[in-house]
Image (cartoon, rainbow, N blue to C red):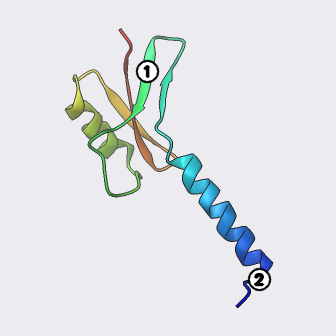
Amino acid sequence: MAYPRSFVNLLVTFLIFVVVTNQDIMAVEANGTCSRQSTTFRGRPCFSSNNCNAYCRSENSANDYGGCYYFRCICHYSCD
């Protein structure tokens, strides 16, 4: 059974999207702030920055903060 070309294109696009979005995120900003994906926020997409912020604070120091970016909980912390 042959699949329609549009279905195959949609499937390939979806697979590329999944591979690209599953890359671990870690960045260093010019102001000395680093970012990384939360290690404790698991199992669901991130919709609430307040909830993400609580996870980030529980991972390290109280000075950490977090936010939702592309449905992931990203923690920001001092690079020092």
Across and down, in percent, residue 12 comes to 68, 64
Give, as a three-letter code, the residue at label 2: Pro
Residue at 41%, 31% in the rendered image: 36
Residue found at the very far right of the displayed protein: 5
Q: Name the residue: 68% across, 61% down.
A: 13
Q: Which residue in the structure is indicated by mark 2?
A: 4
Total count of labels? 2
Q: Is there a contact, CB below 8 Å, between mark 2 and mark 1?
A: no
Q: Residue at x 43, y 46 (%)?
A: 72
Q: Residue furthest top?
A: 80
Q: Which residue is mark 1?
A: 34
Foreground pick, 76 / 5: 5
- Circle 2: is it few (<14), some (14-19), or many (20+) Cα within 10 Å? few
Discs 2/1, front: 2
- Local secondary structure at mark 1: strand
Disc 2, SS: loop
Residue 62 picture location, percent across and down: 22, 24
Q: Type of residue at label 1?
A: Cys
Above or below, 30 against 57 in this view is above
Q: Residue 2, percent across and down?
A: 74, 87
Name the residue at 29% across, 34% down.
56
Name the quarter where the N terminus is drawn.
bottom right
User: In 3D space, how far apart are the residues under numbered discs 2 and 1 (Cα atoms)?
Assistant: 45 Å
Whether 53 is drawn above or below 11: the answer is above
Q: Nearer the viewer, residue 53 or 44?
A: 44
Q: Give residue 1's mark.
A: none
